[in-house]
Image (cartoon, helix red, strand yellow):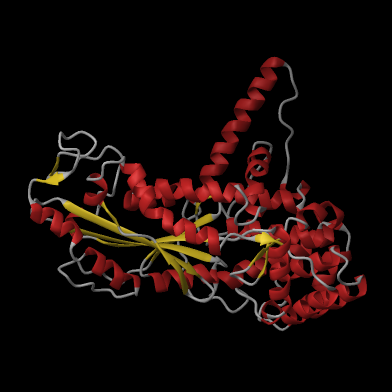
Amino acid sequence: MDESASSGEASSEYGSEYGSEYGMDGDYGAGPQTGATSAARAKVAMTAGVQRVARGLASFFGSPGLPELRMDRLNLWEQAALAFFLGDQRKALMLYHAHLVADGDIASAARNNIRFSRLLKRPVWSVRFGISTYLRVPDEFAADPQPIREGMQIAGLMGRGRGGDSGEASYDNSSVAMESSEGMDSGLEQSMDGIDDPGNGLPRAEKLVLTFGGASTEEARKTIDAQLGLVADVMKTLFSARQGAGNFGVALDSMEAEGQKLAAQMVDVGGVSPNALPMWIPGVDFVGEGVYTDMLAIAKSNQIDFLMHFDIIVKENRLGTPTYTTRCKLLMVGTGETIGISKAIDKYDVAGKKIGIRESVEELLVNLFEIMDKKVTVEPMPALQPQQAIARIDSLLGSANAGSLRNLAEIMMFRSRDLITPELLDKAFLYAGGEGALQMLHDEESLRYTKVNEYVDRELSASDSK
């Protein structure tokens, strides 16, 4: 696509629809948040160990070793990177927005990293994703639903295309294959619409919402691996390639290396906010387990933009082994709109294909990522006129979260592009956030940072209470 044409289209949309609509700036939905901050404790222990080894080696070789840093010596960008390192992506992005507002000239390059999301109808520095699951499984397989794994062997399936003489897969009991496929698509279609009892002899699931607020990244990854297996690994590969390419903005991705470097030098890396959702992979938080409507509410309260929800159905076949079928639904959190749905991924079908198991899974997920590429990928920020910036500011000031750090960062971006005057910037900040917002602009650094911490704590508390 011609970038200038794309920029012109986005600029036109920005001046009309975008000036009066603001994707995620409404009240966030409700969602219980529970758990312990084991991620922070694990990270602290790991970092402390790295420091001890590094300083021990430094002492042995007569070098000064790693410099010790304290939290009060970090600028807001560094604090954001450290929060990201700990797995608290919600707080990391809040601090990043605060950096854009309160760090003056040192944030000028970061302000120019802004992109435009046509789907969200707003500028973004990074799009946030969540992942959730809804597992229907008989009690006997609850501890291990036996998802798709590389190298798996399935009872009842023989003559695999990768090794059988016929070159095609066949079942030694055709009813086993029928049980795996018949009714599963129907059950998945119904469960995607939030129906608890899919019928067709499938196990009934209790409507139990399990949230992972405060859980560790390791706990989240173990849960996702236990339920999704190879599907999760392929998702990670496909998503991370796009995240690393900047398809969803650059803010979160740019924090990774910086956070690791800082953590190795910190006296105390601190901890995550108590109800933070755990990071599954960079850019994606684990929202929890439950029907997708409940997961949407939790994602919304945590300011996540898009939710990748997996519905998983397991049942026992006539051989006493579990079938396994899943499908991923991509949702826009602010509206609840379905953006796309993957093809059904069935364990028996995947195992019976001529190509490898991983390749089979990727083949069934690729359509979802093609939709993501087309609809979710961000664009360069269009060139704007001052009147468009002023119209957008009017819209922000009339929104429910007018004084949020994200909104203030966007207003600051207009000033950095000379679309508004310093006087208009002050007026907008005063109207949006009162004297506190002006203090983040003009006070000396220590006072600016004190006010930023107040804003961050307030926004985290407001998010946790919904």
- Reply above or below: 195 against 286: below
Could one spot residue 100 in this view of the protein? yes
User: Which residue is drawn at the image coordinates 36% and 53% (left, top)?
Assistant: 364
> Horizontally, is 64 left or right of 41 in the view?
right
User: Which residue is drawn at the image coordinates 48% and 48% (left, top)?
Assistant: 238
- Spot occupied by residue 251 in the image (x, y as percentages of width and height): 67, 54
| Quarter of the figure with the N terminus | bottom right
User: Which residue is drawn at the image coordinates 52% and 76% (left, top)?
Assistant: 335
- Spot occupied by residue 176 in the image (x, y as percentages of width and height): 11, 54
- In-front residue for pair 107/458: 107
- Spot occupied by residue 384 in the image (x, y as percentages of width and height): 80, 70
> Horizontally, is 299 left or right of 182 in the view?
right
Could one spot residue 434 in this view of the protein? no
- In-front residue for pair 264/224: 224
Question: Quadrant location of residue 409?
Answer: bottom right
> Horizontally, is 201 left or right of 419 in the view?
left
- In-front residue for pair 3/97: 3
- Reply above or below: 170 against 364: above
User: Which residue is drawn at the image coordinates 62% and 68% (left, top)?
Assistant: 118
Question: Quadrant location of residue 421?
Answer: bottom right
- Reply above or below: 354 against 180: above
Q: Residue furthest top?
A: 61
- In-front residue for pair 105/323: 323
* Count of number-bearing discs: 0
- Spot occupied by residue 90 in the image (x, y as percentages of width and height): 59, 60
